[in-house]
Image: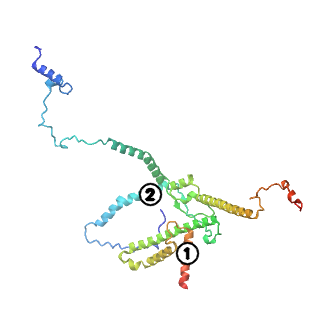
């Protein structure tokens, strides 16, 4: 089975199963329905999975997560060194993808928190909310309106504008 | 004619009048029963049998039949292959890269079919990267050479001491200096 998710980021709510205190002789319909579901859906699916895993247990292969070396970015390249520009551009694109995935993970955490807490998510999800606002603000500042033809150069120019605006505001 | 009965002569006459109509042959005319249209065999099954007149759906059904055939011709083998791959050769599991080991470029994918495609048909992404950088390097060198050539042209044209932009002049031995060789001319 694939590894489980991060239990701290998506905490499970406390179990609310009531203590069984049967006072009638009538059968419990919820119990009947759950047993029915278990025998008709859960058990066949689990046994099927077990069978398939038994067949596949002989030839297991692995895959790895590719790690890229850091190369000097656009500011570290000589002017006219197009090979250096290309490597910097590729590194910037990889970092852009990573940042998009980070934003997606934070969004997913907020969504899970809201689903868990139900109507009281305004108070209980403050941490996730704050994380989300921080991350999205940073993403918007860095990659915000670059558009579909975004490139490392355009991002650098955006950073320059930000620094100029910050300096003008300070002065 | 005396020996023939009246009915037989009537049958022969009717057959001669409209010989092509079926039921008008001599044999039929005498022995056929008259159909009674008020006493139809109605059985309460699917209602009265109707002869529905509609345009031919042969071409439509033929098209759908052929479509089904050609789609399933490759569809079924593909489905069978994909099912067998998923059942017998499972997906890979994520693992840490061991020390000192450089994984092959197909070992970065999960599904066995993706791994096979990457192994059989595609170059490794490292190789593609290097190919792109080689192309960029070649173009850069071409550009630099063109710029230097322009600069060299400019210099040689200006200074005139280089091998280019030399104009052929007349041989100095051919010049006749006699008009100016003595001061009194």
Quadrant where the image shows the C terminus of chain A: bottom right
Pointer 2 or 1: first along the chain: 2
Whether the residues at callouts 2 and 1 have beta carbons within 8 Å, the answer is no
Colour setting: rainbow
Depth order, front residue of A36/B178? B178
Residue bearing the label numbered 2? A50
Q: Is residue A74 at all visible to an observer of this figure?
A: yes
Q: Residue at x 43, y 57 (%)?
A: A49
Question: In this rendering, is residue B13 above or below B112?
Answer: above
Q: Which residue is drawn at 40% across and 78% down?
A: A124
Mark 2 nearby-residue class (10 Å; few <14, some 14–19, many ≥20):
few
Give the side of residue B149 with respect to residue A65, left or right: right
Depth order, front residue of B160/A81? B160
User: Residue A130, image x and y in percent?
Assistant: 45, 78
Is label 1 in a helix, a strand or a loop? Answer: helix
Mark 1 nearby-residue class (10 Å; few <14, some 14–19, many ≥20):
some
Q: Which residue is drawn at 28% across and 71% down?
A: A22
Classify residue B30 by image quadrant: top left
User: Residue A125, image x and y in percent?
Assistant: 42, 77
Residue bearing the label numbered 1? A159
Question: In this rendering, is residue A16 above or below B52?
Answer: below
> Which chain is disc 1 placed on?
A
> Which chain is disc 2 placed on?
A
Tally the marks: 2
Q: Is residue A10 at all visible to an observer of this figure?
A: no
User: Residue A33, image x and y in percent?
Assistant: 31, 63
Depth order, front residue of A37/B182? B182
User: Residue A97, image x and y in percent?
Assistant: 52, 67
Classify residue B122 by image quadrant: bottom right
Is label 2 in a helix, a strand or a loop? Answer: helix
Q: Outermost residue, bottom direction?
A: A171
């Amino acid at each position: 089975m694939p590894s489980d998710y991060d239990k701290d980021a998506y905490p499970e709510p406390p179990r609310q199963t009531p203590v069984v205190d049967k006072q009638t002789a009538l059968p419990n319909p919820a119990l009947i329905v759950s047993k029915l579901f278990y025998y008709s859906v859960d058990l066949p699916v689990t046994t099927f999975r077990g069978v398939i895993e038994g067949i596949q247990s002989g030839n297991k292969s692995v895959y790895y997560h590719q790690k890229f070396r850091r190369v000097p970015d656009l500011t570290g390249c000589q002017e006219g060194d197009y090979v250096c520009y290309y490597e910097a551009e590729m590194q910037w694109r990889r970092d852009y993808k990573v940042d998009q995935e980070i934003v997606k993970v934070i969004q997913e955490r907020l969504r899970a928190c809201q689903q868990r807490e139900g109507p009281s998510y305004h108070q209980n999800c403050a941490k996730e909310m704050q994380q989300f606002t921080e991350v999205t603000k940073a993403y918007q500042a860095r990659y915000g309106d670059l558009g579909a033809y975004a490139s490392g150069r355009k991002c650098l120019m955006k950073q320059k504008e930000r620094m100029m605006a910050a300096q003008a505001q300070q002065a | 004619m005396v020996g023939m009965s009246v009915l037989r002569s009537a049958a022969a006459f009717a057959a001669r009048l409209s010989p092509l109509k079926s039921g008008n042959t001599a044999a039929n005319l005498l022995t056929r029963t008259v159909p009674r249209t008020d006493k139809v065999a109605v059985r309460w099954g699917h209602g009265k049998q109707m002869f529905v007149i509609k345009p031919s759906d042969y071409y439509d059904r033929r098209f759908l039949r052929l479509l089904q055939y050609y789609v399933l011709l490759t569809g079924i083998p593909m489905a069978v292959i994909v099912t067998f791959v998923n059942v017998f050769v499972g997906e890979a599991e994520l693992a840490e890269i061991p020390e000192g080991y450089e994984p092959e470029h197909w070992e970065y994918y999960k599904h066995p079919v993706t791994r096979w495609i990457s192994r059989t048909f595609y170059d490794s992404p490292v190789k593609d990267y290097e190919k792109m950088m080689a192309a960029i390097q070649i173009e850069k060198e071409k550009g630099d050479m063109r710029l230097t050539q322009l600069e060299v042209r400019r210099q040689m044209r200006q200074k005139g001491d280089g091998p280019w932009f030399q104009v052929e002049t007349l041989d100095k031995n051919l010049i006749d200096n006699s008009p100016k060789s003595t001061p009194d001319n």
